[in-house]
Amino acid sequence: MNVVFVGLWEHRTVMRTLCAVFFLSTAISCQARDLTGNWVARNPLPDGTSRDTYLELKQEGSNITGHIRVTQYYYRIVESTGGQYNFVLTGSMMDGHNERRVTYEVKLVGEELHVSTRRRPDGELVEMIARPAPPGQGALPPRLSVPSLHAVPDNGLARTPPMGWNSWNKFAGKVDDAAVRAMADVIVSNGMKDAGYVYVNIDDTWQGSRDAEGNIVPNKKFPDMKARRLHT
Protein backbone atom coordinates (compact mmCIF):
# COMPACT_ATOMS: atom_id res chain seq x y z
CA MET A 1 0.00 0.00 0.00
CA ASN A 2 2.85 2.37 0.75
CA VAL A 3 4.22 1.94 -2.74
CA VAL A 4 0.81 2.60 -4.26
CA PHE A 5 0.28 5.64 -2.01
CA VAL A 6 3.59 7.18 -2.99
CA GLY A 7 2.86 6.57 -6.66
CA LEU A 8 -0.53 8.31 -6.45
CA TRP A 9 0.98 11.22 -4.54
CA GLU A 10 3.71 11.67 -7.12
CA HIS A 11 1.14 11.43 -9.92
CA ARG A 12 -1.05 14.11 -8.34
CA THR A 13 1.96 16.34 -7.74
CA VAL A 14 3.04 16.05 -11.36
CA MET A 15 -0.48 16.79 -12.58
CA ARG A 16 -0.77 19.81 -10.32
CA THR A 17 2.59 21.08 -11.58
CA LEU A 18 1.60 20.60 -15.23
CA CYS A 19 -1.70 22.38 -14.66
CA ALA A 20 0.05 25.27 -12.94
CA VAL A 21 2.54 25.60 -15.81
CA PHE A 22 -0.30 25.47 -18.37
CA PHE A 23 -2.37 28.18 -16.72
CA LEU A 24 0.70 30.35 -16.11
CA SER A 25 1.80 30.10 -19.75
CA THR A 26 -1.76 30.82 -20.90
CA ALA A 27 -1.93 33.89 -18.69
CA ILE A 28 1.42 35.15 -19.97
CA SER A 29 0.29 34.56 -23.55
CA CYS A 30 -2.93 36.47 -22.98
CA GLN A 31 -1.07 39.36 -21.36
CA ALA A 32 1.38 39.55 -24.27
CA ARG A 33 -1.37 39.42 -26.88
CA ASP A 34 -2.30 42.99 -27.81
CA LEU A 35 -2.52 45.31 -30.82
CA THR A 36 1.18 46.19 -30.94
CA GLY A 37 2.63 45.75 -34.42
CA ASN A 38 2.35 46.87 -38.02
CA TRP A 39 -0.95 46.05 -39.73
CA VAL A 40 -2.13 46.48 -43.31
CA ALA A 41 -5.64 46.32 -44.81
CA ARG A 42 -5.71 45.94 -48.59
CA ASN A 43 -8.86 46.98 -50.43
CA PRO A 44 -8.76 45.67 -54.04
CA LEU A 45 -9.66 48.22 -56.75
CA PRO A 46 -11.18 47.51 -60.20
CA ASP A 47 -7.92 48.43 -61.97
CA GLY A 48 -6.03 45.60 -60.26
CA THR A 49 -4.32 47.74 -57.63
CA SER A 50 -5.36 48.14 -54.00
CA ARG A 51 -6.05 50.93 -51.53
CA ASP A 52 -3.76 50.14 -48.60
CA THR A 53 -4.32 51.28 -45.04
CA TYR A 54 -1.43 50.84 -42.61
CA LEU A 55 -1.80 50.96 -38.84
CA GLU A 56 1.51 51.04 -36.97
CA LEU A 57 0.42 50.56 -33.35
CA LYS A 58 2.02 50.35 -29.93
CA GLN A 59 -0.20 49.33 -27.05
CA GLU A 60 0.70 50.07 -23.45
CA GLY A 61 -2.14 48.95 -21.23
CA SER A 62 -5.23 50.92 -22.22
CA ASN A 63 -3.33 53.42 -24.38
CA ILE A 64 -2.34 53.14 -28.03
CA THR A 65 0.12 55.34 -29.91
CA GLY A 66 1.49 55.14 -33.43
CA HIS A 67 0.57 56.18 -36.95
CA ILE A 68 -2.03 55.55 -39.64
CA ARG A 69 -1.32 55.81 -43.34
CA VAL A 70 -4.02 55.84 -46.03
CA THR A 71 -2.45 56.02 -49.51
CA GLN A 72 -0.42 59.28 -49.38
CA TYR A 73 -2.00 60.62 -46.17
CA TYR A 74 -0.29 60.19 -42.81
CA TYR A 75 -1.84 60.62 -39.39
CA ARG A 76 -0.40 60.52 -35.90
CA ILE A 77 -2.61 58.81 -33.33
CA VAL A 78 -3.39 61.52 -30.79
CA GLU A 79 -6.11 59.80 -28.77
CA SER A 80 -7.26 56.25 -28.02
CA THR A 81 -10.24 55.12 -25.99
CA GLY A 82 -11.32 51.63 -25.03
CA GLY A 83 -9.24 48.85 -23.63
CA GLN A 84 -7.77 45.36 -23.97
CA TYR A 85 -8.55 44.40 -27.62
CA ASN A 86 -11.12 47.06 -28.62
CA PHE A 87 -10.16 50.68 -29.27
CA VAL A 88 -11.33 53.85 -30.97
CA LEU A 89 -8.34 55.67 -32.45
CA THR A 90 -8.22 59.35 -33.44
CA GLY A 91 -5.52 60.42 -35.86
CA SER A 92 -4.35 63.93 -36.78
CA MET A 93 -2.81 64.90 -40.14
CA MET A 94 0.98 65.02 -39.93
CA ASP A 95 1.70 67.76 -42.48
CA GLY A 96 1.63 70.46 -39.80
CA HIS A 97 -0.87 72.59 -41.72
CA ASN A 98 -4.05 70.55 -42.07
CA GLU A 99 -6.24 70.03 -39.00
CA ARG A 100 -8.07 67.11 -40.57
CA ARG A 101 -8.70 64.21 -38.21
CA VAL A 102 -9.79 60.63 -38.77
CA THR A 103 -11.39 58.06 -36.48
CA TYR A 104 -10.83 54.31 -36.65
CA GLU A 105 -12.48 51.59 -34.60
CA VAL A 106 -10.22 48.55 -34.23
CA LYS A 107 -10.83 45.15 -32.69
CA LEU A 108 -8.35 42.28 -32.40
CA VAL A 109 -9.96 38.99 -33.46
CA GLY A 110 -7.51 36.11 -33.43
CA GLU A 111 -4.66 37.07 -35.76
CA GLU A 112 -6.74 39.73 -37.57
CA LEU A 113 -7.44 43.36 -36.82
CA HIS A 114 -11.00 44.30 -37.72
CA VAL A 115 -11.07 47.97 -38.71
CA SER A 116 -13.97 50.32 -39.46
CA THR A 117 -13.94 54.02 -40.39
CA ARG A 118 -15.71 56.68 -42.43
CA ARG A 119 -13.85 58.39 -45.27
CA ARG A 120 -15.94 61.50 -44.56
CA PRO A 121 -17.87 62.47 -41.42
CA ASP A 122 -21.17 61.86 -43.22
CA GLY A 123 -19.92 59.01 -45.40
CA GLU A 124 -20.76 55.34 -45.27
CA LEU A 125 -19.04 53.01 -42.85
CA VAL A 126 -16.03 51.24 -44.40
CA GLU A 127 -15.05 47.90 -42.85
CA MET A 128 -11.67 46.26 -43.45
CA ILE A 129 -9.59 43.39 -42.14
CA ALA A 130 -5.93 44.18 -41.45
CA ARG A 131 -3.24 41.55 -41.14
CA PRO A 132 0.34 41.71 -39.84
CA ALA A 133 2.83 43.46 -42.13
CA PRO A 134 6.64 43.58 -41.97
CA PRO A 135 8.00 46.26 -39.60
CA GLY A 136 8.52 49.58 -41.37
CA GLN A 137 6.33 48.75 -44.36
CA GLY A 138 4.11 51.72 -45.21
CA ALA A 139 6.01 54.08 -42.91
CA LEU A 140 6.50 57.76 -43.65
CA PRO A 141 9.60 57.97 -45.87
CA PRO A 142 12.52 60.01 -44.55
CA ARG A 143 12.47 63.70 -45.41
CA LEU A 144 14.96 64.69 -48.10
CA SER A 145 16.94 67.85 -47.55
CA VAL A 146 16.38 70.70 -50.00
CA PRO A 147 19.38 71.16 -52.31
CA SER A 148 21.27 74.41 -52.06
CA LEU A 149 20.45 77.18 -54.52
CA HIS A 150 22.55 76.78 -57.66
CA ALA A 151 22.49 77.66 -61.31
CA VAL A 152 21.29 75.01 -63.77
CA PRO A 153 21.73 74.96 -67.55
CA ASP A 154 18.75 75.78 -69.76
CA ASN A 155 17.12 72.56 -70.99
CA GLY A 156 14.41 74.21 -73.06
CA LEU A 157 11.57 73.24 -70.73
CA ALA A 158 8.89 75.55 -69.31
CA ARG A 159 9.93 78.57 -71.37
CA THR A 160 6.24 79.29 -71.76
CA PRO A 161 3.41 78.43 -69.34
CA PRO A 162 2.57 74.71 -69.64
CA MET A 163 -0.82 74.43 -71.34
CA GLY A 164 -2.83 71.26 -71.81
CA TRP A 165 -5.54 69.02 -70.43
CA ASN A 166 -5.68 67.23 -67.05
CA SER A 167 -7.65 64.01 -66.69
CA TRP A 168 -8.56 64.45 -63.02
CA ASN A 169 -10.85 67.42 -63.61
CA LYS A 170 -13.18 65.28 -65.73
CA PHE A 171 -12.60 61.60 -65.02
CA ALA A 172 -10.82 61.44 -61.63
CA GLY A 173 -10.14 57.77 -60.86
CA LYS A 174 -12.22 56.51 -63.80
CA VAL A 175 -9.72 57.64 -66.43
CA ASP A 176 -8.44 55.02 -68.87
CA ASP A 177 -6.42 54.71 -72.08
CA ALA A 178 -9.40 55.31 -74.38
CA ALA A 179 -10.46 58.50 -72.57
CA VAL A 180 -6.96 60.00 -72.71
CA ARG A 181 -6.56 59.31 -76.43
CA ALA A 182 -10.04 60.71 -77.13
CA MET A 183 -9.14 63.96 -75.34
CA ALA A 184 -5.90 64.20 -77.33
CA ASP A 185 -7.90 63.85 -80.58
CA VAL A 186 -10.23 66.67 -79.49
CA ILE A 187 -7.31 68.97 -78.62
CA VAL A 188 -6.05 68.51 -82.18
CA SER A 189 -9.40 68.73 -83.97
CA ASN A 190 -10.69 71.87 -82.24
CA GLY A 191 -7.52 73.92 -82.78
CA MET A 192 -6.25 73.94 -79.20
CA LYS A 193 -3.03 72.19 -80.24
CA ASP A 194 -2.25 74.97 -82.68
CA ALA A 195 -2.90 77.50 -79.91
CA GLY A 196 -0.23 75.92 -77.72
CA TYR A 197 -2.12 73.28 -75.73
CA VAL A 198 0.30 70.39 -76.20
CA TYR A 199 0.26 68.52 -72.87
CA VAL A 200 -2.04 65.66 -71.87
CA ASN A 201 -1.66 64.94 -68.15
CA ILE A 202 -3.01 61.56 -67.06
CA ASP A 203 -2.58 62.60 -63.40
CA ASP A 204 -3.39 59.67 -61.07
CA THR A 205 -4.74 56.06 -61.02
CA TRP A 206 -2.77 54.92 -64.07
CA GLN A 207 -0.05 53.22 -62.03
CA GLY A 208 0.11 49.61 -60.88
CA SER A 209 2.85 47.71 -59.08
CA ARG A 210 6.63 47.89 -59.60
CA ASP A 211 8.68 45.58 -61.77
CA ALA A 212 11.82 43.70 -60.74
CA GLU A 213 13.93 46.83 -61.27
CA GLY A 214 11.64 48.95 -59.11
CA ASN A 215 10.04 50.84 -62.01
CA ILE A 216 6.34 51.69 -61.73
CA VAL A 217 4.30 49.86 -64.35
CA PRO A 218 0.78 50.82 -65.49
CA ASN A 219 -2.36 48.99 -64.43
CA LYS A 220 -4.81 47.20 -66.71
CA LYS A 221 -6.61 50.46 -67.63
CA PHE A 222 -3.47 51.48 -69.55
CA PRO A 223 -2.21 48.32 -71.28
CA ASP A 224 0.42 50.08 -73.42
CA MET A 225 1.78 53.38 -72.16
CA LYS A 226 4.38 53.53 -74.96
CA ALA A 227 1.86 53.23 -77.80
CA ARG A 228 1.76 56.41 -79.90
CA ARG A 229 -0.82 58.12 -82.01
CA LEU A 230 0.72 60.71 -84.31
CA HIS A 231 -1.05 63.90 -85.40
CA THR A 232 0.07 66.14 -88.17
Image: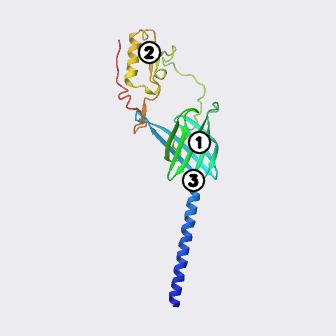
Q: Earlier in the sequence, mark 1 or mark 2?
A: 1
Left or right, residue 37 beside residue 194? right
Rendering quarter of residue 80? top right
List x then y, in percent, for residue 36.
Answer: 57, 50
Callout 2: few (<14), some (14-19), or many (20+) C-alpha neighbours within 10 Å?
some
Task: Give me the residue at 55% from left, 69% from top.
Answer: 21
| Residue 7 seen in the current view | yes
Residue 14 against residue 124 in the figure, above or below: below
Dot 1 amino acid type: His
Q: Which residue is mark 1?
A: 67
110 left or right, relative to 191: right
Camera-side residue of 179 and 145: 179
Q: Amino acid at mark 3?
A: Asp
Q: Position of residue 150 (x, y in %)?
A: 58, 24
Query: The residue tagged with tag 2: helix, strand or loop?
Result: loop
**Amino acid type of disc 2?**
Val
The residue sitting at 45% across, 13% down in the picture is: 197
Q: In the image, what residue occupies the spot 61% across and 39% down?
A: 91
Of discs 3 and 1, which sits in the foreground?
3
Which of discs 2 and 3 lies nearer the camera? The answer is 3
Residue position marked by numbered label 2 in the rendering? 198
Q: 10 Å neighbourhood of mark 3: few (<14), some, or many (≥20)?
A: some
Q: Percent position (x, y) of residue 30? A: 56, 59
Q: Is residue 4 above or below residue 33?
A: below
Circle 3 is placed at which residue position?
Answer: 34
Give the farthest residue toward the bottom: 1
